[in-house]
Amino acid sequence: MGKNRKKGRKEEPFTKGRLMKSIMGIFTSDPSLSLNYKQIAKRLEIKDTSTKRLVNEVLNELALQEVIREVYRGRFMSNVVSKTLEGVVEIESDGNAYVVTDDGREYFVPEHNLNHALNGDRVKIIISPGRRHRRLEALVTEVLERAKRTFVGTIEVGQSYAFVTPDNRFMRYDIFIPGDGLKNAKNGQKVIVRITDWPMHSKSPVGEIVEVIGNPGVHEVEMHAILAEFELPYRFPDRLNKVAGQIPEKITKQDYSERRDFRGVNTFTIDPEDAKDFDDALSFRIINEAMVEVGIHIADVTHYVLPGSPIDLEAAERGTSVYLVDRCVPMLPERISNFICSLRPNEEKLCFSAVFEMDLEGNVHSQWFGRTVILSKRRFTYDEAQRIIETGEGEMATEITTLNGIAQKLRQRRMKAGAINFDRVEVKFHLDEHFKPTGVFFKEQKEANQLIEEFMLLANRRVAEHIGKAEDKQRPKPFVYRIHDKPNPEKFDSFRSFIARFGYHIQGGTDKQISKSLNLVLGQVKGKKEQNLVETLALRAMAKARYSTANIGHYGLAFSHYTHFTSPIRRYPDMIAHRLLAHYLDNGKAKNEEDLERLCKHSTEMEIRATDAERASIKYKQVEFMADKIGQHFQGVITGVTSFGLFVELAESKCEGLIPVRELQDDFYEFDEDNYCLTGRQWGRKFQLGDVLTVEVWRANLAKKQLDFLLVEEGESNATIHTHDMTNGKKGVKSRKPK
């Protein structure tokens, strides 16, 4: 009876007071919301026209009372300071910032509201209405945890004190050094400085010199400075090299007896020409006309590096090897990475292997994981292997061509399943004996690269599936996965709408349909002027891959299970995967998931640092390469639009520089954040992503790794466009018709 009465009772009509209370409840529950009267009515399930009109009336009354504010015509937002939140600071190039809170929301922080917070710091904020009345602004009230206390910069020495100007573009404050903290640093030198104090009412932090790196412009000094800036090591401690020197390389009788012997099976490596650490090899054996055995043999680093040993602790801290433009800073001492564990030809080596019996279509009929001993009979470079693939002739031609055929079948299957084909061109430099860049060249992925890639992917996937696919509905044992989430819908929609301007369209609604359509677009842009831009924006729309014990699959590869198993010489997560696989193959108990997750998080952070350092070294060489081309004109494409200028990438060298907005002197330009463009207020001229421009190289700042360009207008007098043979630095000139 009671239930029937309740069900039959009509909802009370909205009075003005009740409506006001309900509307305020909506805005205070989420201060970041901006809504119009129709959206409010929908949330309150109001359908009749008269009450909708009352909603509009209440909104305007609340705006007059300054309880809410009209951000633009008909759309309102909370005008009340919210509760305190915590998040991480992300500083933009113009000095303003965003704080990303723990629930993933972003709040704008103008530079004057940062209160000494630096990029990456964890902070407390309060939210208040913005000065521009367009969005909420955050005010940093407390720095909870500094992300970074040491910086690299150039020192300017006075009589009793000094200042260090940091190289880091996100660090916009000079660091004051009292006279007793100089450590013999001389004026103009590169130094590492640590912040020791930052008084509340002082503009500049106080610091001390940690290390004097040397004179700027010297190649070795600049590479050391890049590593120091990202707090990465640049050499091994002598004590660890001594420990590595004591590790015996001799394979014992016990090692042979405990391992599967592959020394009699044809085995080879394929690596870049300049590689020194060969951590993977392939073996090939014909079983019958329809079946082959493929062994994927990975250097057994964990046989030599024991858990908790000094070398292991150092490797865990480093997380990864670092590849700068001119060198590799290894994760392990060179005696291990380049000698004991490197799968060099004609040397017996210990491996951890994944062995598959497969048909020629790439279907796996059986698999085996375990420790092996191998003997690589040949070391191929990618170019050598590619020639064999193309001609069908050469040493081990049967093995390589058969494996390539299987690899291409695996690749086709992966793409059909929804993998995304990010096959980007890699920029490399020709360096002379003094490491000065003399030319640029581009490395493309060919079938020889794909051969190795597909079999490494197969091993990584199958190892992850072996651990992660629990039997009998049991919970899978903790493991280290390489995961990649789906794209952020907002970012991907922006990317989708942007490329439509070029005539490219991404169709479909399912993950598989979208990835197939995206691959089609990535194929269509090959060789077009907008290729690099479209590929870069597609990557930006994607989530970032990371390590985790929580397996959500790998979106980009279209794998439900994936790990990193195949590069233990250069990645610590691969060493963890080796140890876990061996432990579980021996029926070991589940490992502690929290400990593994901490290692995953640290490894991801170190990978990001290493990638940023690599990019910084490339950027340095790009600026150095362009430094003698001041005043020359080049064609480029707009790759970034900000409130402070246009980023332009040169077509032939892929070097990127900035046209400052203040140098666009024909009009006053306003930044359209939604459409990624600058528009002239008076004449309506528009600069947007993908536009092709002619630019003049204006300034090359090696210290800041920054190129500045000037816009060259069509028909300018005495203008020339320079083109270069980027492989040897030869210069040609195309004359442009004077005005």
Image (tube, rainbow, N blue to C red):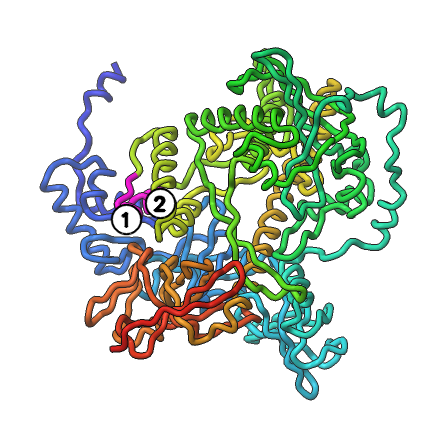
Q: Work out whether residue 288 or residue 10 is closer to the camera in this orientation and state it.
A: 288
Query: Which is more N-terminal, label 2 or label 1?
Result: 1
Q: In terms of image quadrants, where is residue 735?
A: bottom left
Residue furthest bottom as drawn: 159
Q: Work out whether residue 338 or residue 461 is closer to the camera in this orientation and state it.
A: 338
Tell me the magenta residue range. 489-505
Query: Residue visible at 52% across and 55% down?
Result: 441
Residue 698: image tag: none
Q: In terms of image quadrants, where is residue 680?
A: bottom left
- Return the x and y of residue 615 as percentages of the image width and height: 55, 56
Q: Of helix, strand and loop, which one carries label 2?
A: loop
Query: Residue visible at 20% across and 67% down?
Result: 684
**Badge 1 vs badge 2, beta-carbon distance below 8 Å:** yes
Query: Residue visible at 69% across and 21% down?
Result: 369
Residue 502: image tag: 1
Magenta residues, dominant SS class:
helix
Mark 2 lies on residue: 525
Q: Which quarter of the rendered picture does the N terminus lie within?
A: top left
Q: Is residue 501 magenta?
A: yes
Q: Of helix, strand and loop, which one carries label 1?
A: helix
Three-letter residue code for mark 2: Val
Q: In terms of image quadrants, where is residue 356?
A: top right
Other residues around mark 1 within 10 Å, as few (<14) / some (14–19) / many (≥20)? few
Q: Which quarter of the rendered picture does the C terminus lie within?
A: bottom left
Q: Is residue 673 left or right of residue 285?
A: left
